[in-house]
Image (tube, rainbow, N blue to C red):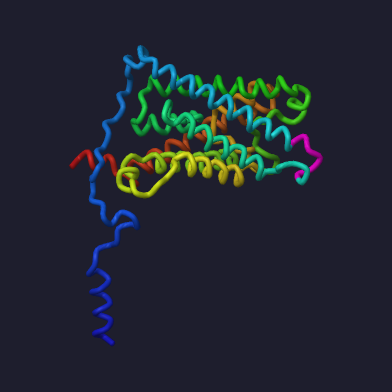
Amino acid sequence: MEGKEEDVNVGANKFPERQPIGTAAQTEGKDYKEPPPAPFFEPGELKSWSFYRAGIAEFIATFLFLYVTVLTVMGVKRAPNMCASVGIQGIAWAFGGMIFALVYCTAGISGGHINPAVTFGLFLARKLSLTRTVFYIVMQCLGAICGAGVVKGFQPGPYQANGGGANLVAHGYTKGSGLGAEIIGTFVLVYTVFSATDAKRSARDSHVPILAPLPIGFAVFLVHLATIPITGTGINPARSLGAAIIYNKDHAWDDHWIFWVGPFIGAALAALYHQIVIRAIPFKSKT
């Protein structure tokens, strides 16, 4: 028995850890080179049409996002009961499905952010300049305001009577609970964005087909299922701002800070986790 125990101990350390499935034939760094970080400020962007085209794409995408999703929320709110509407699951599908479609449509133009928290996370990871970050966030917020405004224009009475799709911390939950839900929910989303769009992963697993908008949209869907009962699910400051401005009731502003602070903290944590733990970027720069 002692001999067998020794064999087990030796065998446990005899062979190196297996590589993940699909990467066994790949070598570190094959077909991949770490892109340089984006400059903090790039004034040359302001002279480029592609810069403004990307901002317009973010505006239109966020406009369409708010239009479809807030209309869905209004349909559920107006129904006599959940069984007479698409319910929470339908709202979650509307948010996740629209993100899937819109990221697919705009990824090649602007990156398909449609969310200031995503833009902020990518900025912290040095994938965007400050110039582009500020421009994207402004255009996203304007698009969200216009999208919610169109919904109110179609049905002003029901819009005001049913909350306008504004995010609120639900009764029975504390502000701390709402903040925590927004932080974790945004972490899930932004972490998925980093993983699905990782250039190294694309080079390493180029033989494995993956459509980046799909996991991103699915992450939005799942987070909505989990947090709609708590905050209505923000995880997108532009979405929360657009609905709050158009609805414009005092109670819609009471907890509004949660839907900016929470997503930005969640995005920052996701960026740090991906860059430092998953990709180990700071350690690579020292070697």
In the displayed orientation, state which residue is furthest to the top: 47
Image coords of residue 99 (percent x, y): 54, 35
Q: What stretch is highlighted in magenta?
A: 77-82
User: In the shown orientation, is residue 199 left or right of residue 133?
Assistant: left
Image coords of residue 221 (percent x, y): 57, 43
| Of the pair 23 and 184, the residue shown nearer to us | 23
In the displayed orientation, state which residue is furthest to the left: 287
Magenta-span inclusion, residue 78: yes
| Of the pair 90 and 249, the residue shown nearer to us | 90
User: In the shown orientation, is residue 170 left or right of residue 270?
Assistant: right
Image coords of residue 141 (percent x, y): 54, 22
Quadrant hosting residue 121: top left
Q: In which quarter of the image is the C terminus?
A: top left
Q: Residue at x 67, y 43 (%)?
A: 88
In the displayed orientation, state which residue is furthest to the bottom: 1
Image coords of residue 283 (percent x, y): 24, 43
Q: Residue at x 35, y 30 (%)?
A: 127
Q: Which residue is drawn at 51% across and 35% down?
A: 263
Magenta-span inclusion, residue 41: no
Instruction: Say if 19 sits above or below 145 in the image.
Output: below
Q: In which quarter of the image is the N terminus?
A: bottom left
User: In the shown orientation, is residue 203 left or right of residue 163?
Assistant: left
| Of the pair 26 and 141, the residue shown nearer to us | 26
Instruction: Say if 203 sits above or below 165 in the image.
Output: below
Residue 277 in sight in this render: no
Residue 184 in sight in this render: yes
Quadrant hosting residue 156: top right
